[in-house]
């Protein structure tokens, strides 16, 4: 129950509206549920509302962890 | 697509699959319940199960709000559209749910009801503004991910002073459902549903944070790992759960650290608390009545409550006697153990809600995975 | 006294005029509509005769005939409109049988009140598509229905083609070992349409792929590659077309998700709406079932053709009593690619 996607804010209009972009497709979305969003931020968008900001550092860390664990497992495989 | 494709990478998948295979202790089985329709869908759509050792079993929990929506509530939505002539706005997921008298919202539409699919509740609000002479009702379903947007539009409707907009509130709560599962006799007493841990929902958790799950970890000694939405996230979470089980730990861990914090989205939580309050009890399809598990609109916003605006009453409707949705939602049975699966009940002709929603265990299995048990049956 | 000008008919008001009931009544107004809009645009000898039917020369061989109804909404979309769509669609159906398309007919159901300016746009687009493809519209019909009983305009097109000697394409001819090819990226048309639907409000650069494919088909057939079946994956997308063929031929299929070409914007749009590109309509692509040995050759012929950019081999046919179409996901797991259930609805879950 959560079709939500990470998308980049490309424009902010007025108090609470933004244009977000994913893979070249743009869509309008509401920022009413988050604070201090700026152009360039990545947000998780669900049913036309940004739910939270995505932390790029944590994202990189997570991906790095996948790679590290994977490599260790494959390397150590008998 | 940044932050999407990287989390679906096949190479990293192979690595994580190897890691899970190594972590699994010989002679031990693991059963984990995933509690998010998005996870059910990701697992089936990407074939994640194929990359897991046979000893790790995934159980689909009641994480799909369409699946747990009782027929009686859908009947109310249909009644609004057919009998009261409202413009009924709904998310696409609800359209084919089979309700009473052989109706569904889609069938009601073909009988002349004004039923509209919207992608966002904001679209429903906009419709109400554009058509002041029509009563517009938004059919609000969903867990905590979807509730804050509904709160926003109700507040906006108040600011705008709209006279023709209301919401049929069917929002439900995740922790209540998890607690209910853990309290069920099959889990607590009989042990017929072995449950070693939970994969916590992705986007619900961005809103409610990781804190609410700490209670379950402590009280029931079950580990919870909150996982992101993508298949690699799910695999990583499974690895973390396996490790916890091996080490005898029962903690809340957060794999979805790029979007989930311990506190969650306080702004959204406060907004929800302002507009909604707990219902004393609510019927969940398959789980029966669960206390303090759902929301209704507060008195301050009564003008926007469809249940107060229109003369509706909730009637409990029993499922087809052969329908095993309840047992399947609780993880007690598997889709193919339902007599109706694939015969009377198919995605084309769904009899129960597990088949209607593409995230329902039955639909997911039928659509993506039913070749597996056929292969087994032939072997 | 004013002299009555013989044969004077005031021209159609193509700027502000609308279709009204007299245009379908069979009288002068209808004749004028046909003459000024249809006949002039389609301009060929057959129509020029003005008879009830077109007399066609006999054909030296087997004939293929196909018909299509077009109800697309919106009528105009990035990359095309209902007019050229209908021409391309029927030409493609005939071409998928391996036949050379020769003639088209077109029937129109017009709604009272439909702007003549829009009608002209559609007709001109059809005429252009017909000319570019070299397939004339030789007969047609028009009816008008009352306001509220139509969706602007519905078009039905029928095509006739000539099947060369020795060509036998059929969805029942797929055999274990055959390779499955697509001529390009999938999902473009369906998502271009979605982008136009207001309620889904997103703006993107997705353009419909509508085009006539008989040139591409001719190139493929003359390459000598052993082609068993051709089909254009329109409504229901690639998944539906492959399931149809699997069923007809009594076989199963295994696809490689990583090999299936999808434009980034189409993939992103599908993600945003919770749709699967495998089930989204295409109007300018073909699926080819080719004997294993000739697959690479067929691929290079397609890829070398301007309409075959991004052509790819996407899977293999195998024995399967259940006729499942399966797929190895880009993630490395396996899943079924099942028949579409009802209509693909955008989902939030």
Image (cartoon, coloured by chain):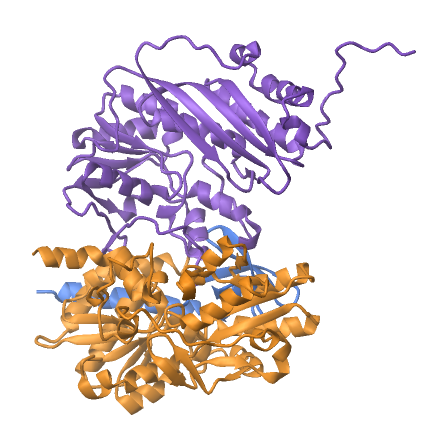
**Quick check: C160 above or below B207?**
above
Q: In this view, does C65 lie above or below C349?
A: above
* Residue B33 screen position, x and y as percent: 27, 75
| Left or right of C155 on screen, residue C40 | right
Residue, far front:
B101
**Which chain is rendered orange in the image?**
B
Identity of the residue furthest to the bottom in this view: B219
Chain C tint as drawn: purple
Q: Position of residue A70 (x, y in %)?
A: 22, 65
Considering the image in quadrants, where does the N terminus of chain B appear?
Answer: bottom left
- Residue reaching furthest right? C1
Q: Can residue B308 be seen in this view?
A: yes
Q: Is residue B113 left or right of residue B43?
A: right
The residue located at (28%, 63%) in the rendering is: B362
Query: Is the residue B179 above or below the residue B129 in the image?
Result: below
Q: In which quarter of the image is residue A59?
A: bottom left
x then y, percent, for residue C139 = 51, 18
Chain A: drawing colour:
blue
In the image, what residue occupies the spot 64% across and 71% down?
Answer: B156
Residue at 66% x, 67% y: name it: B164
């Amino acid at each position: 129950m959560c079709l939500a996607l990470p998308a980049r804010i490309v424009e902010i209009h007025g108090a609470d509206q933004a244009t977000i972009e994913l893979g070249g497709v743009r869509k309008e979305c509401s920022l009413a549920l988050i604070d201090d969003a700026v152009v360039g931020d990545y947000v998780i968008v669900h049913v036309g509302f940004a739910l939270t900001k995505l932390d790029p550092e944590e994202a990189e860390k997570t991906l790095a962890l996948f790679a590290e664990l994977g490599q260790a497992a494959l390397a150590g495989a008998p | 697509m940044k932050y999407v494709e990287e989390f679906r990478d096949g190479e990293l998948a192979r690595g994580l699959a190897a890691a899970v295979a190594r972590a699994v202790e010989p002679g031990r089985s693991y059963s984990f319940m995933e509690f998010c329709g998005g996870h059910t869908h990701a697992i089936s759509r990407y074939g994640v199960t194929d990359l897991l050792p046979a000893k790790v079993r995934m159980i689909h929990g009641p994480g799909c709000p369409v699946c747990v929506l009782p027929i009686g509530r859908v009947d109310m939505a249909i009644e609004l559209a057919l009998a009261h002539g409202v413009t009924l706005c709904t998310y696409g997921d609800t359209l084919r749910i089979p309700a009473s008298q052989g109706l569904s919202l889609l069938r009601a539409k073909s009988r002349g009801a004004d039923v509209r699919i919207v992608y966002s509740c904001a679209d429903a609000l906009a419709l109400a503004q554009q058509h002041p002479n029509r009563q517009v009702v938004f059919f609000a379903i969903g867990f905590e991910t979807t509730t804050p947007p509904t709160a926003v539009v109700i507040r906006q409707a108040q600011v705008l002073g709209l006279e023709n907009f209301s919401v049929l509130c069917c929002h439900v709560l995740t922790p209540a459902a998890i607690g209910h599962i853990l309290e069920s006799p099959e889990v607590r007493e009989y042990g017929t549903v072995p449950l070693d841990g939970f994969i916590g929902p992705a986007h619900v958790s961005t809103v409610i944070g990781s804190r609410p799950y700490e209670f379950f970890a402590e009280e029931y000694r079950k580990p919870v790992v909150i996982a992101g939405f993508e298949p690699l996230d799910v695999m990583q979470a499974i690895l973390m759960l396996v490790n916890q089980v091996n080490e005898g730990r029962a903690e809340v861990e957060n794999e979805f650290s790029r979007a989930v914090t311990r506190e969650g989205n306080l702004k959204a939580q406060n907004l929800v608390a302002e507009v909604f309050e707990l219902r004393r009890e609510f019927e969940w399809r398959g789980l029966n009545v669960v206390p303090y598990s759902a929301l209704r609109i507060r008195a301050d916003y009564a003008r926007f409550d469809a249940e107060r605006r229109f003369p509706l009453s909730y009637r409990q409707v029993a499922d087809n006697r052969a329908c095993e949705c309840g047992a399947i939602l609780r993880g007690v049975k598997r889709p193919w153990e339902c007599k109706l699966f694939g015969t009377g009940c198919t995605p084309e002709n769904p009899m129960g809600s597990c088949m209607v929603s593409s995230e329902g265990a039955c639909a997911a299995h039928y659509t993506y995975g039913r070749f597996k048990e056929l292969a087994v049956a032939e072997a | 006294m004013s002299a009555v000008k013989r044969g004077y008919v005031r021209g159609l008001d193509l700027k502000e005029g609308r279709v009204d009931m007299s245009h379908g009544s069979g009288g002068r107004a209808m004749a004028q509509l046909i003459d000024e809009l249809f006949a002039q645009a389609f301009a060929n000898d057959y129509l020029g005769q003005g008879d009830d039917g077109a007399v066609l020369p006999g054909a030296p061989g087997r004939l293929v005939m196909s018909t299509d109804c077009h109800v697309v909404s919106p009528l105009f979309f990035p990359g095309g409109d209902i007019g050229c769509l209908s021409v391309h669609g029927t030409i493609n159906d005939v071409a998928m049988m391996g036949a050379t398309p020769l003639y088209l007919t077109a029937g129109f159901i017009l709604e009272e009140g439909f702007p003549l300016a829009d009608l002209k746009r559609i007709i001109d687009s059809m005429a252009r598509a017909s000319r570019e493809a070299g397939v004339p519209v030789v007969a047609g019909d028009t009816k008008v229905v009352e306001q509220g009983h139509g969706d602007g305009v519905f078009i039905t097109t029928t095509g006739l083609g000539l099947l060369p000697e020795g060509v036998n394409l059929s969805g029942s001819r797929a055999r274990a070992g055959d390779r499955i090819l697509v001529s390009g990226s999938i999902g473009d048309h369906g998502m271009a349409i979605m982008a136009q639907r207001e309620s889904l409000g997103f703006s993107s650069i997705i353009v419909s792929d509508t085009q006539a494919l008989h040139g591409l088909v001719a190139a493929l057939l003359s390459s000598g590659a052993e082609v068993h079946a051709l089909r254009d994956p329109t409504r229901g997308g690639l998944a539906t077309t492959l399931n149809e063929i699997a069923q007809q031929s009594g076989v199963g299929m295994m696809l490689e998700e990583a090999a299936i070409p999808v434009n980034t914007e189409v993939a992103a749009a599908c993600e945003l709406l919770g749709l699967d590109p495998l089930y989204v309509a295409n109007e300018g692509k073909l699926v080819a079932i080719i004997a294993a040995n000739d697959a690479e050759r067929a691929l290079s012929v397609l890829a070398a053709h301007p309409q075959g950019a991004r052509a790819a081999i996407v899977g293999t046919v195998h024995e399967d009593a259940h006729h499942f179409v399966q797929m190895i996901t880009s993630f490395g797991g396996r899943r079924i690619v099942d028949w579409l259930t009802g209509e693909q609805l955008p989902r939030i879950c």
